[in-house]
Image (cartoon, rainbow, N blue to C red):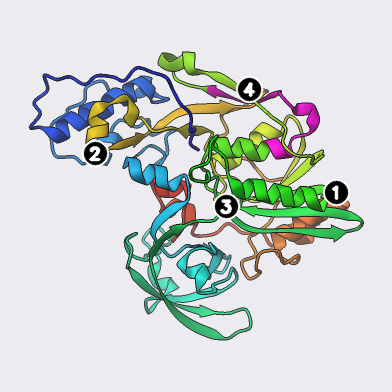
Amino acid sequence: MIALVLLLVACNPDDDNVDPTKVENVVHKAIFDVMNDWYYWNDEMPKDVSFGGTMSNQEFLEQLRFTPLDRQGWTYITTQEAFRAAFTGQVSGVHGFRMAMDQNERLFIASVLKTGPAGQDGWQRGWQILEINGKAIAEFRNSSGSYSIDTGPNQIGISNTFKFKLPDGTETTRTITKEAFSANSVAFENVYEIQGKKIGYWVYESFRASPNVSPTKSLEVENSFNYFISEGIDELIIDLRYNGGGSVDVARQVMNYIIPASADDRTAFVYRHNRKQSTNNRTVNFNKEGSLSLDKVVFITARGSASASELIINSLKPYLDVTIIGDNTYGKPVGQFPLSSFSRTLVENNVEVVPVTFSLANVRGEADFFEGFKPDALVGDDLTKNWGDVNEARLAAALNVITSGSTSARMMSNYYSPKWEMIDQFEGLEKEFPMF
């Protein structure tokens, strides 16, 4: 969850007396200084830190983290270019698809970015992955009993060969190369007419802003909600099962389309910083967009639903009837913004420090959902069905909630907890937008 905000704070001049030949040491000192100023748990940072040694910048940062709450991968080091690119959908060195595992430890394509190599090759959700580079999926099992799915480094030109079993029972083998491309965030959208109701269904997979658009927003979000408005939907299902987060500004944009008119200009969420930065605490209000008039919304979630996905649920709960279908969300009630602008040394060395810097509370002050949000109905991920199939377990359960007010025991009986979750295999910037 990233806040793309402008903070008018004086740049922190670095110590000109530090030996300039010890470049790595100077960078470590700069990392410590910005963390000491902005890290959400700065009071828990170690005070006696050495700036010598041969640790990498990430290794140095790791020793500063407050590990009881700051999970592995939340606070990270990247470059300024990589950070800017990721939050506007400019990805590089990936095939452009997501994987998930069913209750029988079969691996499936879970979602495909239509703009990436996999999408351009026609891959679809519901294809079972039998082999990767000639290795059966069981061979990727690790010592912990989970899996480490290896497709090589995220570099342009890396190729992998996948063997699939298609829904009709036939098999196909495809070889594709990792490339750079502009990633789409909307995997699927449709309107269903059931029992006299128009029900919108929106599969949204990352809160990315459109490049070169000011103020920060997503044109994909705008287009999707204009579609739902033109269709005159009565109900809305938002599928965030693989959405690891992204821009707070884009999350607010989504909320502004969903909220009832009565919530206009009321509190959406409140930024809370550490004690040093308490003057930056601020309240963000809703600003109603469009003409949708909804009194409830159904969310489909899973462990892959994190950060900005959870912010939307938490912020809307006080204003709408919110129902959650699927599995427990990840549990990340905190967010980050990049800190290189506060250090000349970090800028000159192209080091972007992105630590946890704030939490976000809703209008009721609710903010500490580190265990995630529990669903109202536990329903397993039906990986054999493509997006939009009304027989897909989670979509079927969400539609049933809207049409009958509940989810049947039969629909909930298929629940399972996967042995492997894609989001857990990624760290840092990639954890926010996980894909292979």
Which label sits on residue 365? 4
Q: Residue furthest toward the right? A: 196
Q: CA distance from mark 2 to mark 4?
A: 35 Å
Q: Amino acid at mark 3?
A: Glu
Q: Is residue 186 magenta?
A: no
Q: Position of residue 431 (x, y in %)?
A: 44, 48
383 relative to 394, above or below? below
Using the rendered image of the protein, determine whether residue 347 is visible from the camera's viewpoint: yes
177 horizontally vs 212: left or right: left
Q: CA distance from mark 1 to mark 2?
A: 52 Å
What secondary structure is marked by label 3? Answer: loop
Q: Which residue is mark 2?
A: 57
What secondary structure is marked by label 4? Answer: loop
Q: CA distance from mark 2 to mark 3?
A: 30 Å
Residue numbers of the magenta segment? 256-271
Q: Position of residue 402 (x, y in %)?
A: 83, 51
Q: Which residue is mark 3?
A: 205
Closer to the camera in the image, 238 or 45 = 238
Q: Are marks 1 and 4 in contact (CB under 8 Å)?
A: no
Q: Could you tell which of marks 3 and 1 lies nearer the N-terminus?
A: 3
Q: Amino acid at mark 2?
A: Asn
Q: Could you tell which of marks 1 and 4 lies nearer the N-terminus?
A: 4
295 relative to 266, above or below? below
Foreground mark, 2 or 4, reads 2
Foreground mark, 3 or 4, reads 3
Q: Which residue is mark 1?
A: 405
Which residue is rendered at x = 53% and y = 62% of the image? Answer: 113
